[in-house]
Amino acid sequence: MGDLLGEDYSLVEKNALYRCLDKVLEHKQALFTHLTERWRGLLGAKFDVLLYDLTSTYFESSKPADEKDKRRYGYSRDKRSDCVQVVIALVITPEGFPLAYEVLAGNTSDRTTLREFSNKIETQYGKAERIWVMDRGIPTEEVLTEMRQSDPPVYYLVGTPKGRLSQLEQKLLGLPFTLVRSGVEVKLLAHEQELYVLAKSHHRIDKERSMRRRQLRALIQRLKELHEMKFNSTQTLLLKLGAAKGKYPAAWRLIDIALPESKTRGANVTFSFRLNRQKLREVRRREGRYLLRTNLSGREPAQLWQFYIQLVEIEAAFKNLKDDLQLRPIYHQLQQRIEAHIFVAFMAYCLQVTLRARLRPVAGGLTPRAVLDKFAAIQMLDVKFPTTDGRTLILSRYTEPDTDQKLLLQQLKLTLPPQPPPRITASSQPLQ
C-alpha cells in the first residue's frame, strides 16, 4: 500500500488512522489558524506577502465513475497526462510557512481559482494589506480589477504574457534601467492604474541564448538530414517534420519551411528551409527579460524584483511535498482517504518548515533532511535479562548521541528525555 504511513503499519492500523484523520480534517481551517499564530509568536513569521500557485498530483488508478469525484484528467505538472489527478492550490509566505491549501478537481483551470482562494484567506485571517505574488497564468483581468478596487486594496505582483511587452515596448525603450543587484536591472513604467516592471537578468540572457543555440543547431542538423532523404509522399514528409517540431518547439518558430504545393505520390518529395533572421533578432532582444505588473506604488525596484523571485520558494515547497514527503502517486480510491493522504503530507511539510526556521539562525547551512538523517542514528533498544523466577527484566535505552548530534541538540535547545525506567514482565515468556 503505497501511502505516507509506510510499511510499519498493518492494513487494520492504517484504516483506523485514516478514520481518525477523517475527523481531524473537519478542523483543518482551525488548525492552520493555530499554526500561523504559533509561527508568528515563536518564529516571528510575517504574513503580509503571499505566494500563490497550483500543482497537480496523479493517481495509480482508473477514472472514477462518480461525476462528483475530484479525480479527473487535466494538465499534468508531473508529465503524467495518462493518469487521473487532483489539483492542489497553495498559499505560503516567502519563508515557506503555509496559510492554506485546497484540493480541487483535476481538470480545474488555474484562472478560475484566485477569486475563491483570496476570499478564503480574507474570511479565515481577516482583511489586511497583503501582497499576492503569482505567475502570469493565474489571474484574469476581471479579478485584478476587483483587487485594485477592493477596500482595503489587495495588492498584487504578477507576470505578464510576452505579447504585452510588445504593446509597451516603445514606451519602455526611452526609460533608464536601474541596477538592483549584480547582473539584474529594472525599469518602471506607470500605465493605466498599474506599474509595469521590466527586469533584465544578464545571467538569464546567457542561459536562454545557450539553450536556443543548442536547439537551433540540433534542429537545423535534423532538417538537413530530412532534406537529403527521399520521401514518396507529402504525408510521410509532414510526419517527419512534425516530429522535429515537437522535439525542438522553441527553435522551430525561428525556421521558415517551404513545403510542396500539392500532395504528391511516387515522386521525390522535398522541401526547403531557412533561418528567419528577423525573428531571431526579435527573440534575442527579449532574452532574459521579464515584464511584471503590479498595483503597488512607491516601492523600490529592487524590492519589487525580490518579491517576484521569491516564487521559487513555492516551487521548492511543491518539490518537497512530491519527492521528500511522498505526496505522489496516490493509490486511494475514496475521496476522504485522498484528502487525508494530502493532509498528512502537508502536516509533514509544516514540521519541515518549522525545523528549517529553527535551523536558519543557528545552522543555516543544514537542511531539515540532513538534520533528520543525523538524528535517525539515535536508536531505541530493548535490553532483556532473564530473572531466576522465569520473568524478564527489560531495559529500554536510547543510544548515546555523538558529537554532531549533541551540538545540534544544543543549538536547537532540545533536551533528550531521561532513559525510561526498567520494566519486568508479569509472567514467564520466552526471550525473542
Image (cartoon, grey):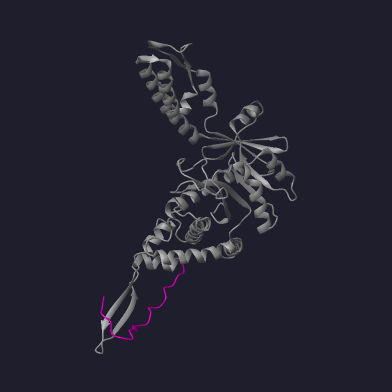
Judged from this view, the residue extending furthest toward the front is: 65
Judged from this view, the residue extending furthest toward the left is: 388
Residue 45, image x and y in percent? 58, 59
Magenta stretch, main secondary structure class: loop
Residue 426, image x and y in percent? 33, 86
Front in this rendered view, residue 370 or 297: 370
Which quadrant would the N terminus be assigned to in this image?
bottom left
Which quadrant would the C terminus be assigned to in this image?
bottom left
Front in this rendered view, residue 209 or 179: 209
Picture quarter containing residue 324?
A: bottom left
Residue 174 in sight here: no
Residue 179, image x and y in percent? 57, 38
Name the residue: 47% across, 53% down: 321
Residue 145 in sight here: yes
Residue 55, image x and y in percent? 52, 46
Please state the extent of the stretch shown in magenta in the rendering: 412-432
Residue 420: within the magenta?
A: yes
Name the residue: 62% across, 41% down: 111
Judged from this view, the residue extending furthest toward the bottom is: 389
> Relative to 228, is 396 above or below?
below
Q: Is residue 224 left or right of residue 296?
A: left
Residue 280: within the magenta?
A: no
